[in-house]
Amino acid sequence: MEYLGESKPVNSIEPLVSVCVPTFQHEKFIEECLASILNQKTDFPFEILIGEDESPDRTREICKKIAFENQDKIRLFLRKDSKKIKLFGKKAGRGNQLGLYGSARGKYVAFCDGDDFWLDPLKLQKQVDALESYPEAYMCITNYSIGNNEGEVKIPQGNKIFTKKEHKKMSYFGHVSCWLVRNRMNLLLKNRIIEKPLPLDAILFAFYKQMGDIFYLYDITSVYRYNPKGLYLSQTNKNKHLVNISNAWYKFRYIDKDFTHFFRSFSYELKRYFAHLIN
């Protein structure tokens, strides 16, 4: 259900960028998150799509208030807990996130989890300028800081274009809240891999890196709050390696069809699994 219907000012614009914000139990963080997106300075229109997954705290109340005050920018989708699917034996927000992807109208799609936030008010402008100038790239990834005082990530030094050949061996790069991608969500949503129990950001990266180059900007534009209680991070090390083995198979079967990459990933995770089993 789209809060306040589809006659809001934001529904009548043609956004160049759709920013997807999935949120659940983020009452301490969601205001800062949304303020950092609303404060973006761009020379193009953009929309903010919030998916609120029926949180037991005040997250929904806060989202409704901010959406009401910003009807020229925000489309708020109110999800039902009864519609959630299970991943790793727990209820997950996969349906909420995929719903946002399917509702994104922009030429480009950005992401910001409800407990993360953006530091740079020119983040979207810089990333759009990068992809507009380089049509061979399908992702623009920036540098980012990790929350909880863990410091910032600086890989690599300086701006860089990663060609398909160069990023072929990458399983992941950056963090989803610092990504901007070309909107090919219609193709992603048709791929059966979205039904599988992989972390969705890992699916996104595997899907988009097959399409073209990656434009990396060294600018620090976002903050990622590390959450050890998340569905994947809360798994034991042994379980993580088992999950990564199945992930490698799903990515091979449904996306890249690269047996060499699959065998390398499979072998590495299997060795790590037995190492933890022995210990």
Image (cartoon, helix red, strand yellow):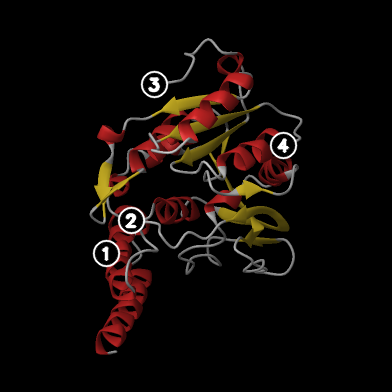
Q: Are dots 4 and 3 in contact, CB under 8 Å?
A: no
C-alpha separation, residue under disc 4 versus residue under disc 2: 31 Å
Q: Position of residue 67 (x, y in %)?
A: 57, 24
Q: Are dots 3 and 2 in contact, CB under 8 Å?
A: no
In which image quadrant can residue 228 be found? bottom left
Sooner in the amino-acid sequence: mark 4 or mark 3: 3
Camera-side residue of 235 and 271: 235
**According to the image, label 4 marks what residue?**
40
Mark 2 residue crowding within 10 angstroms, few (<14) / some (14–19) / many (20+): many
Camera-side residue of 233 and 14: 233
Mark 1 residue crowding within 10 angstroms, few (<14) / some (14–19) / many (20+): some
Mark 3 residue crowding within 10 angstroms, few (<14) / some (14–19) / many (20+): few
Mark 4 residue crowding within 10 angstroms, few (<14) / some (14–19) / many (20+): some
**According to the image, label 1 marks what residue?**
246
Sooner in the amino-acid sequence: mark 3 or mark 1: 3
Q: Secondary structure at mark 4?
A: loop
Q: Position of residue 259 (x, y in %)?
A: 32, 68
Sooner in the amino-acid sequence: mark 4 or mark 2: 4
